[in-house]
Structure formats: C-alpha cells, structure tokens
Image (tube, grey):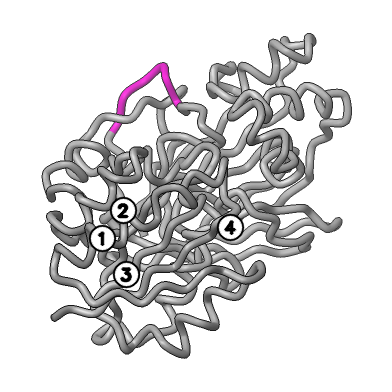
Amino acid sequence: MKKMLFLVNAHAGKTEIKAKAIDIIDIFIKGGYEVTVHTSQHPLEIPGYIGKHGIEYDTIVCSGGDGTLNETVNGLMRIDESKRPELGYIPTGTVNDFANSVGISKNLIQAAHEIVDGSPVKIDVATFNKRHFTYVAAFGAIAEVSFETSQHHKNLFGKSAYILEGLKRMSKIKPYKMQVQWGDFVFSGDFILGMVTSSKSVGGFSLFENQKDDMRMDDGFYEVTLVSMPKTLTASAEMLNAILRMDLDANSIISFKANNISFHSDTPVSWTVDGEFAGKVYSADVNVEKRAIEIITDKKRELERANIIAQTAYAVPYWEPYIHM
C-alpha cells in the first residue's frame, strides 16, 4: 500500500476543507493509500515538517492556497531528488493561481479524485534568494497588494479584494530604480512592477491578453516582465486595470525569458513570492531548476493542454535580444 502525507491548512480561503476533509481522506484510502494527516500549526512550519518526515511517503498532498503550496514545495526541495515524493494539490485558497495554470480542479472532491486517478508530470521550480517558489516572484505596484490584502477581505470579496487594495495604494505607486542582469546583459531602469513568473495569472487576473505565445512549465525558463511608469495613464482605476492586464504601451514593458536573473537596487525593495511576503532586499537572485518536482494532474494531457502546449497571451513582443541561456 502506498503511503500519503496529507497536509491541511484549515484556515485557507473560506475554510471549505473543514467540511470535506473526511470525504477526501476516504477517497484517498479507497484509492489505495495509507493516509497520515497533519494540520498546519503555524506559518512556515510545513517545510521543516516535510524535511524531517517527507522521505517516509510516496505522495505528499497539500490542501490550502498558493502560500501553503509554496511551503510544501520548499519542503519537497529539501529531499534528494531521487527520493522526492510526488506532489498532489487540493486548492482551497482565495485565487489559486497555480491551480488555474496547471488545470487542477477547484472542486475539492474532484481534485482528490484527480490525485488518485491522475499521472505525475514534471514541472520547473525557481528560487528567490534560495527560497523556492512555484509561479511568481514580484516587486512593486500590485505585487505588494497580494500580501497586504487581509485574509478577511479575501474571504469576503475574493479577487475583488485585490482591486480594492490596489486602488487604495495607487496614489503611492513609485518606481524602483533597478539594475537587472542576466547572462552578459546588464541594464537599468525605473520600474513600477517586476515579475518572474511561469503562471498565466497572478492574483486571479489573467495576464498578457493581447498577443499569443507559448508558456511552458517544464522548459527551464520563466517569463520576466518589467513595467515602467506609463506616461499616458493618469486615473487610478484605469492604471490598475492596465497593469493587471499588461495592457500598456509597448515602450513601458520589457519582456523576455530567462533561467537566471539578478536584480539590484540602492534601496530595499519589497518582494512577494507566490503571493506571500518575501522581505525587503537590496538584491534578488532568481534561478530556475528545470523539471524539479512531479505534480499529479488529472491526465498528462491536461497539463499539456493547460500550460505547456497552451497559448498564453502577451501584451508586447519579447524585448530584443530574446535570450535563452
């Protein structure tokens, strides 16, 4: 019998997992798993718990939002790759960007069935100053909104809570002077937003709607997007919407793919990784580890359809030169 560690963040999202946990565990047991349940006791507990106990299991399933998933991935990455368990995910957060990108059902019961009946697919994982993340590291503008929006407002308003918080902060938006380096290329600019992402949505909002291009989660590259302060947008709501959709003048956006990139600033900059606060730092190094973990999806073709082969829209063509390192 296969062994499963089921990690539950009972406070994520609208706490729907509390009413369905028994049914989900029953699905796992009927699917041939011996299940051990551990409820998350406090933030940042999960990585250490997996590092200590994870090697004992064939599969580790986490239930929670993107932050819970982030902690689980950080725990998995502490285990030698040859002994690393498969990952299952039951999304119960407010927006669940990662689940949206890979095609995991937001119906908790259906997601449990997909773990039992599905297939593991390898995907990339990145590091932000040695902290692993699955889908986004970001600074500036709306990036700060993700970790400053209260859980109470997220539960009440869903992704609209991010809009409300964003509008409140628009008058405070300021550009960060950053030096950016990848490979032999170095440039500087004043940016109101920077993202390194493998996801087609952030904060529940679809990105890059105007132009199509492949976005893969297994090619060893993440998408880098840097946004300068638009000169033509003045109204707060208009600017926020334009930033969320990346519907800005092409001269305001730099976009390219990279597997390692460094950011440097003369002042400390607040960063978020997978929607959680990652600290205020002067320098940030982001590196991509190709096909580092295996995540169970409904069928392998579902992940391919959703994000590996699927078309994802971009606001502007990639900035030249287009670099693969």
Quadrant location of the N terminus? bottom left
Question: Label 3: which residue?
Answer: 292
Front one among 177 and 116: 116
Residue under the point 36% across and 58% down = 22
Whether residue 189 is visible, yes or no, is no
Q: Is residue 325 above or below residue 65?
A: below
Q: Is residue 49 magenta?
A: no
Residue type at tag 4? Gln
Front one among 228 and 69: 69
Front one among 116 and 305: 116
Q: Is residue 162 above or below residue 32?
A: above
Q: Is residue 160 left or right of residue 97?
A: right
Q: Earlier in the sequence, mark 4 or mark 2?
A: 2
- Mark 3: few, some, or many residues within 10 Å (few <14, many ≥20)? some
Q: Earlier in the sequence, mark 1 or mark 4?
A: 1
Instruction: Examine the image and state in which quarter residue 31 appears.
Output: bottom left
Question: Label 4: which residue?
Answer: 181
Residue under the point 17% across and 43% down = 304
Q: Choose mark 3 or mark 4, whichever is in front.
A: 3
Q: CA distance from mark 1 to mark 2?
A: 5 Å
Residue 290 spot, x, y in % from top left = 31, 65
Q: Choose mark 4 or mark 2, whichever is in front.
A: 2
Q: Do residues under tags 3 and 4 come within 8 Å of each other at their CB atoms?
A: no
Q: CA distance from mark 1 to mark 4?
A: 50 Å
> In terms of secondary structure, where does tag 4 sit?
strand
Q: Is residue 300 left or right of residue 57?
A: left
